[in-house]
Amino acid sequence: MKKTQPVIELAVSEENAVRLASQGNAEAFTYIYEQNVTRIYNYIYYRIGSEADAEDLTARVFHRAFGHINSYVEKGVPFSAWLYRIAHNLTANWHRDNHRRKEVSLEEQYDIPLHEDMPELTLEKSQEKETLLKAIRRLPPARQQLILLKFLEDLSNGEIAVIMKRTEGAIKSLYHRSLISLREELNQINEQNKNLND
Amino acid sequence: MNQPGNNQGWGIEERLSILLKPVTPDPAFIHSLKARLNRTPELMLETSRKQINLLTVALGLVTGALLLWLIRRFKA
């Protein structure tokens, strides 16, 4: 399954688009926007779980990026990596400002296609997804970012290293630690659910 | 402690692959944001802000030099 175009593949055409956009070329803006809007939206959506807030933050990412495109220094790093960093920072701010916000049921938020012929399967999958997302959200922000970039965006360790400004080795190590933490969080959630049901 | 890569670790990776699917944003939102970005002359504002900053610094330098010259002249 191929999800979105890998970050590195876009680097050459993006480089030109960014150069043109910084000169005020509207088509270049549109190109950069269209190439990145869905992936940035997805990243934010899975980090915060609210469609309305994901739209708001996605808009802010692009306003900020295009407003500061002149200060973007091309260092062989894809423009999308810069967008992800802005998205990551805005998401962190959102979490800081909303940490007491009432949690909305993830089941209500995430749209899982219904199979009319197999309602039990759909419900099971929905609950499994809800538990998994709950566990992901309990992880530190860097680990959440890594898991989403790996599984949602299908990025390699090298591409994630560029976005997160770390070495590939560090990403590999963080990935292993993240999976261990995730499994522990899942066990805790399952244990809590079991106690509630007893 | 179990390491990722064993049965449980792979189990989590499989679950992540299966359950974390990209969602499609509302096309109306995509379209309206594109229109808003095209309408907002943020880039121009950024450029003019830079120019204003440069102009302010230059004006400050000229005023400072003029004041120094006047003070020296009065002292003389």
Image (tube, coloured by chain):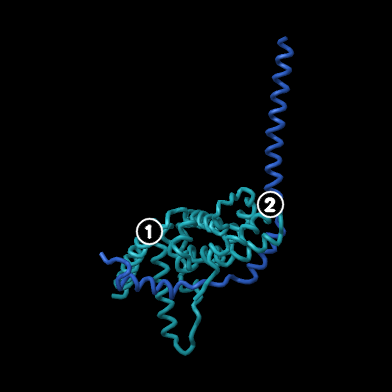
Q: Amino acid at mark 2?
A: Leu
Q: Which mark is residue A174?
A: 1
Q: Is residue A117 above or below residue B25?
A: below
Where in the figure is residue B71, as x and y percent of width and height? 71, 16
Q: Which mark is residue A149?
A: none
Label 2 sits on a secondary structure element that is: helix
**Residue at horizontal 63%, vertical 52%?**
A69
Q: Is residue A67 above or below residue A177?
A: above
The foreground one among A14 and B46 is A14
Spatial CA span between label 1 and label 2? 37 Å
Where in the figure is residue B32, as x and y percent of width and height? 67, 66
The foreground one among A198 and A76 is A76
Left or right: residue B74 versus residue B30 is right
Q: Quadrant of the C terminus of chain A?
A: bottom left
Where in the figure is residue A125, as x and y percent of width and height? 42, 79
- Residues packed near mark 2 inside 10 Å, few (<14), some (14 to 19) or many (20 plus): many
- Give the quadrant of residue B25: bottom right
Q: Colour of chain A?
A: cyan
Nearer mark to the viewer, of 1 and 2:
1
**Residue at horizontal 41%, vertical 60%?**
A143
Q: Which mark is residue B43?
A: 2
